[in-house]
Image (tube, rainbow, N blue to C red):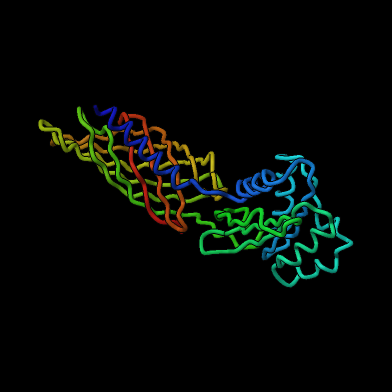
Amino acid sequence: MRIKAVCLFLFFCCELCFSKQKKSYIDEVLDYVSRDISIRCKEQETVAILDFEAKTLEMKDYINSQLISGIFENSKLQIVTRQHMDKVEQELKFQSSGMVSDSTALSIGERLGAYAIVFGELEELDNKYLLQVRMINVETGSYALFKKYEIARSSKTEQLLHHAATIYKSSLGVILEANRNSISHISPSAGISFDYSILRRFSIGLKMLASYDLWEKDDYIYTVEPIAFLRIYTVSPTGEPSTGLFIEAQVGPEFLFVNSNFKTVISAGCGLGFRVPVTNFYFEPFLRAGYPYILGVGINSGFRF
């Protein structure tokens, strides 16, 4: 029953962790857009892609190049871009002063002999971006696609938009854990944690945990664990430093108080977890194993600075 309970707890933590990470980042969204455009056109049709409005030239170029690349991968459409539009250069001057109008886009599409014309803009919100995409059927003048796609912030979007990246190198949190610092039962444990990122993927830190064998009737067991750790982040879905899946090596003294007896042993082990960042806060479920304890599973949550 205890093993099942631990497994269910781990499953719940993983589900919660990955559900929070279920975001659409810019490359994924642009792939969705290219597929949406492709399925609305017949093979060998000509589609004109206008420059998307964004705050920086780098973001404009990135959106256009990724869209064109995705359309070529997902269809056999013929693509006309800004570089091929010399004969409608006059109509394109509006792009330097604001969002393209439907009537101007339609006029450009007609002159190019395109089946459809695609344009849009990137809007910035507090914690995300909205990419508005409009696709007009040149023959009918009606929308073939009018949709907003949500894009999560990432290091790539911030770099393309020239935003100063906020890098959190330190974190301080509270730990709740269930472990086997017991003779025959699972012990509740609590503590604090501090870590500092010396590189994008490497952190060092300290934890202080205290356990109590709550259900043991014959013996009173208290455990205090000062733990030093070295952490390596192996996968970061957002690209942000010091986030995502990590493994860590742990070592430190362990002070055991069993009834009136005091004992000190060396504790060593390893940990596995996943850090989920939420602005300057974080949440991370973890699992650890080693000697002299058998297993520990818990949650570490706090703030980054």
Q: In which quarter of the image is residue 96?
A: bottom right
Q: In which quarter of the image is residue 75?
A: top right
The quadrant of the picture occupied by the N terminus is top left
> Going by the image, does 185 lie left or right of 291?
left
Tell me which residue sits at (40%, 45%) in the image. Answer: 284
**Count of numbered tags:** 0
Relative image position of residue 164 (x, y in whole percent): 60, 63
Q: Is residue 199 visible?
A: no
Q: Can residue 249 be seen in this view?
A: yes
Tell me which residue sits at (39%, 32%) in the image. Answer: 269
> Going by the image, does 253 lie left or right of 275?
left
Relative image position of residue 161 (x, y in whole percent): 65, 61
> Going by the image, does 256 lie left or right of 170?
left
Tell me which residue sits at (35%, 44%) in the image. Answer: 299
Q: Residue furthest front?
A: 140
Q: In which quarter of the image is residue 295?
A: top left
Q: Nearer the viewer, residue 103 or 188?
A: 103
Q: Which residue lies furthest to the bottom in this view?
A: 97
Relative image position of residue 271 (x, y in whole percent): 41, 36
Relative image position of residue 2 (x, y in whole percent): 25, 29
> In the figure, 50 relative to 98: above or below?
above
Q: Which of 169 and 176 is in front in this view?
A: 176
Q: Which residue lies furthest to the left in this view?
A: 218
Q: Which of 283 and 290 is in front in this view?
A: 283
